[in-house]
Amino acid sequence: MSLFFVIIKIGDYMKSCLVLEGGALRGIYTAGVIDYLLEKDISFDTVVGVSAGALFGCNYISKQRGRALRYNLKYRHDKNYMGFYSFITTGNIMNEKFCFDDLVNKLDKFDYDTFKNNKTNFYAVVSNLETGKAEYKKITDMTKKDQIEYLRASGSMPIISKIVNINGNKYLDGGMADSIPVDWALKGYDKVVVVSTRAIEYRKKKSPIWPYKLVYRKYPKFIDTVKKRWIDYNNTQDELVKLEKENKIFVIRPSYSTGISRLEKDLNKIQEQYDLGYNDMKKCFKDMKKYLDK
């Protein structure tokens, strides 16, 4: 009798996935969302992050509530963190040594042990320049060089970041090939919660392709991906609205636009964007729980 009960419970188990969109400092919205989830001790079977979604999302796995906001407010104006000085001196808009050594190992230490021991699966999305396609890399140990490189590649914005070479493959920002991996999540999970960093009405506009043709002329498939990115992104946003109406996913998105930029320097706007994420999650928490528990 007890064995039958266990089988029934296992069969009824619903696998869950949290999808985190990127957007550079716009992604501090996500930090507010996941900090509220940490406060309520909510976990998922899997978390998949894109670009800033991965960079901020790893703090959810290490259970370091408030860390992403804290170091952005403290170091945003440090010339070695992010900006023009870093770009002209290193070729990366985000300084590799500062962000992936000094910050995580000295200035605001990352909890490697908690991350490694967390049972939640964590994936970072990267864009392969040779194929032009997205790859979903499982990150299990942030002390391993290749795994931290996948995380760095996920947040390496084209044009203003160097190509990241890992095991003979070349990668950049995961958002170029799959900005919001909801389709990937739906293939393996019953319950999917998406954190979008754009308001529901936002749609991308077509942007000039010539800079990419100039810089990435050796990677025609990547250029093809960039050409149709605005179309793919808008189709995904339309899909989110449709799937949410059908109760197949749950979406958390900004209730209004703060006007924050990708490389925002105004600390008040960064704080506002974080607070918006925290408060939006707080307001829809009961509805999300109902969706997950149903």
Image (tube, rainbow, N blue to C red):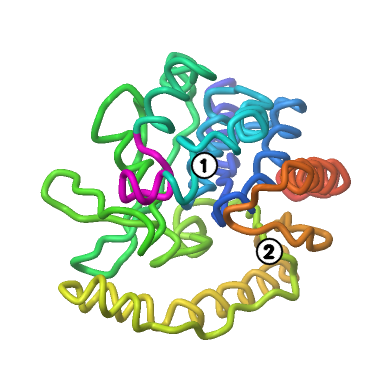
172 horizontally vs 1: left or right: left
Q: Secondary structure at mark 2?
A: loop
Would residue 83 be counted in the magenta stretch? Answer: no
Q: Percent position (x, y) of residue 128?
A: 26, 61
Of 172 and 266, nearer the camera is 266
**x, y (%) of residue 66?**
68, 27
Residue 248 sits in which quadrant?
bottom right
157 to the left or right of 201: left
Residue ID at (38%, 83%): 209
As displayed, is residue 251 above or below residue 274? below
Exactly how many numbered labels are in the figure? 2
Front-most of 66 and 183?
Answer: 66
Residue 174 versus residue 251: which sits nearer the camera? 174
Which picture quadrant has residue 293? top right
- In depth, the one of 182 and 22 nearer the eye is 22
Which residue matches tag 1? Answer: 47
- Choose mark 1 or mark 2, whichever is in front: 2
What kind of residue is marked 2? Arg
Residue carrying label 2: 198
Say whether residue 119 is left or right of residue 244: left
Q: Residue at x 74, y 70 (%)?
A: 200
Badge 1 amino acid:
Val
State whether residue 220 is above or below residue 256: below
Q: Residue 89 lies in magenta, yes or no?
A: yes
Q: Do the numbered discs 1 and 2 sit on residues whose CB atoms are within 8 Å?
A: no
Residue shown at 51% from the left, 59% from the top: 186
In space, the residues marked 1 and 2 are separated at their CA atoms by: 19 Å
Q: Examine the rendered structure and indicate whether residue 251 appears above or below residue 207.
A: above
Q: Which residues are magenta?
A: 86-96
